Image: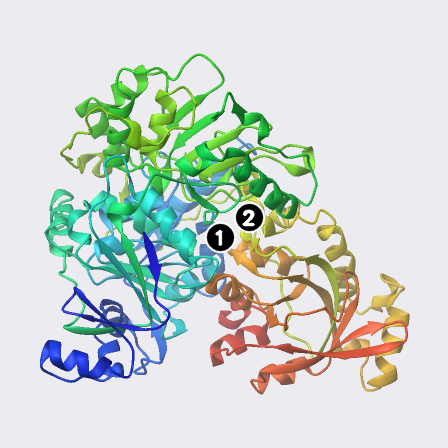
Amino acid sequence: MIRLSDGGVYLIKGSRIVEDSPRAAEEIQSLTGKSITKEEAAKETISYGILERHNTSGDMKKLKIRFDKLTSHDITFVGIIQTARASGLEKFPMPYVLTNCHNSLCAVGGTINEDDHMFGLSCARKYGGVYVPPHQAVIHQYAREMLAGGGRMILGSDSHTRYGALGTMAMGEGGPELVKQLLNQTYDISMPGVVAVYLTGEPRRGVGPQDVALAIIGAVFERGYVNNKVMEFVGPGVQGLSADFRIGIDVMTTETTCLSSVWTTDDTIREFYEIHGRTEEYAELAPGAVAYYDGLVTVELDKIEPMIAMPFHPSNTYTIDEVRRNPMDVIADVEKRAQVSLGGAVEYSLKDKIKDGKFLVDQGIIAGCAGGGFENICAAADILQGASIGTGGFTLSVYPASMPIYMELIQNGCAAAILETGAVLKTAFCGPCFGAGDTPANQAFSIRHSTRNFPNREGSKLQSGQISSVALMDARSIAATAANQGVLTPATEFDGTLKRYAYHFDANIYKNRVFDSKGQADPSVEIQLGPNIKDWPEMAALPENLLLQVVAEIHDPVTTTDELIPSGETSSYRSNPLGLAEFTLSRKVPEYVGRAKDIQLAQKALTEGRCPAEEKPELLEIMKAVQGQFPETAYQNMGFGSVIFAVKPGDGSAREQAASCQKVLGGWANIAHEYATKRYRSNLINWGMLPFLIDRGELPFANLDYLFLPGIRKAIEEAASEVTAYAVKKDGLEAFTLRLSEMTEEERQIILKGCLINYNRV
């Protein structure tokens, strides 16, 4: 079904695989009649060509990328624009689309969500952007319909910024990376590895794109096989997939922790652009005659079965039949994972979901950038035709990803078929994906064609004794389960007809509602601000020395951004840095905020010209211990703040607030064995936080210990790869080593100045 190569491979003429070995050159010569080096062949990938065209450094090993377009939604664009304004923004230098698909309901926090929307509209007018009002489209569907282009690059402040199926290399990053683009700076990375995803065969009837995506995620995630690499989809199996099917696989590549994705294109993708009135944006993309890849994922589409990702991660995958055959074994594994993920905060069990040998589900959701596509919903409608979801506790909600899709579902009758079952059809909204809509009942089990199923991602609150959980499935099997009134059922058991529906895109919907400045800024426009929209607080430059208190120690295998800064109703405060910071780690380490604020008082005292020990008397003994070995240190050449340790932080969302909330509470660093994603590490750096690494093994410090980092400013100035830190113990200082992986000169300057705002301040 899914196979991973142990090393690099050559792809010959798009269809023949040759493993990298001492005999590879000879085999390539016999197949093509010419010789080629590995270095030359690596330049023949689709990815290399796109990156080369967008690189401004002149060095393909150290890239400085300028993107073609930017996109954000209403959880992120206020902070991005506020940061750019503080740095002298006068005009958006490239197309920038502001969508409103996260805080769309305006149901929590009084006026603050609509205030954000009006802020976005006024900024689109003032700086020359595009504004998509609430309920018109989710961010990624609008980008597919109106922004994507063959060979283009798009940067979005959402982790699922993936338009590779349309020939667009798109990346999801934290807001500061978009700020850099708005200020005519660059996205700086080393040349990423490129992994071929080689598709063969055709999917079985009833198997959808989420099934394929989950099978891939389950195979690659734990090994980190594609971590921070580009996934390039090639092979004969591509041509048998519709554009929607490819898009449905592509959007989920984010859950593999890859950097980006791109697909070979063909007439199917040309037709997609034609339907959307943008034929000129199509480009035929294919690897060269001999292309070298750093790895190979072989996907036999005809062997993929309906899949389910059980709580609490998209990589926790099984076939649906496995769950039905051995439910108690699967449940035992999930409950074991829950002990780690939930930390025993609530009692958790799924055993009551098994009745008479059947697995019963409480809720179904088809939504967002992954599930809300036209073909997914049409297939669900066919499976639901004439059925009833029942009058019991099971519910089904369907969210088309854009108003043009919604309109077509009305025109072709699929909307009526869904509504007749007792299901609910709703507008374009990302809420179910991040806990701001359709939160299930306590102890309920929801199946969703959406992007993620992290702990509490669905909106439940551990701190209130609540827990519900989500499994990811394809829309087709969700519909089959709904037709069976909540009994877990794979779509392959549906014996009716799955029709092919033509899609007609109605461009008038956007023409009549979306504001498009056509790139023309109007400096006379006054930005509309609400009382919750706050500027970033002042942030200090990196001091000569640091004294940091460990205020959270997390030993879970992976810590998600949802755990660092919870999603859901907290998103209403995303325009208020200090207000949002109150929620930091609230579901994982409830004591964090109080501890961070406590040590931050020492820094505030120092800033005000007072002795930090006035606020933290224990610093008298700590400083005495430090000065015993480093007599030249004093309060005046020291900075005080907090640090967290996590094994592998940063999986999941691109949201910058996972880092910025720590920063505004006085955080100066993270310590980790590794960082789950490049984007989280970038967020730390852009907010002036040190991304330390420490070798695996017993930690040389414990929670609430103080860590002394002498000469840290000099170490950053001199591009040191390691620093010696000291844990302050009762009997003195204990030295240990922290590593700093390679940083660009710009990244070092950002940390030295304290954050990206300070770096760019004019």
- Please give the name of the residue rendered at 30% of the width and 15% of the height, measured from the top-left corner: 420
Q: Residue 654, percent across and down?
A: 47, 55
Task: Determine which residue is flagged by label 2.
Answer: 562
For residue 104, which quarter of the picture? top left
For residue 502, which quarter of the picture? top left
The reply to whether discs 1 and 2 touch (Cβ–Cβ < 8 Å) is yes
Task: Determine which residue is flagged by label 1.
Answer: 652
As displayed, is residue 571 above or below residue 521?
above
The three-letter amino acid code for the residue at tag 2 is Asp
Please, what secondary structure does the residue beneath circle 1 have?
loop
Q: Nearer the viewer, residue 8 or 752?
A: 8
Whether residue 403 sits left or right of residue 192 in the image: it is left
For residue 559, which quarter of the picture? bottom right
- Please give the name of the residue rendered at 41% of the width and 31% of the height, measured from the top-left corner: 365
Q: Nearer the viewer, residue 235 or 693?
A: 235
Q: Residue 31, percent across and down?
A: 12, 76
Q: Residues within 10 Å of mark 2 (few under 14, many from 20)?
A: many
Q: Residues within 10 Å of mark 1 (few under 14, many from 20)?
A: many
- Please give the name of the residue rendered at 47% of the width and 37% of the height, measured from the top-left corner: 471
- Please give the name of the residue rendered at 83% of the width and 67% of the height, measured from the top-left corner: 612
- Can residue 520 be seen here? The reply is no
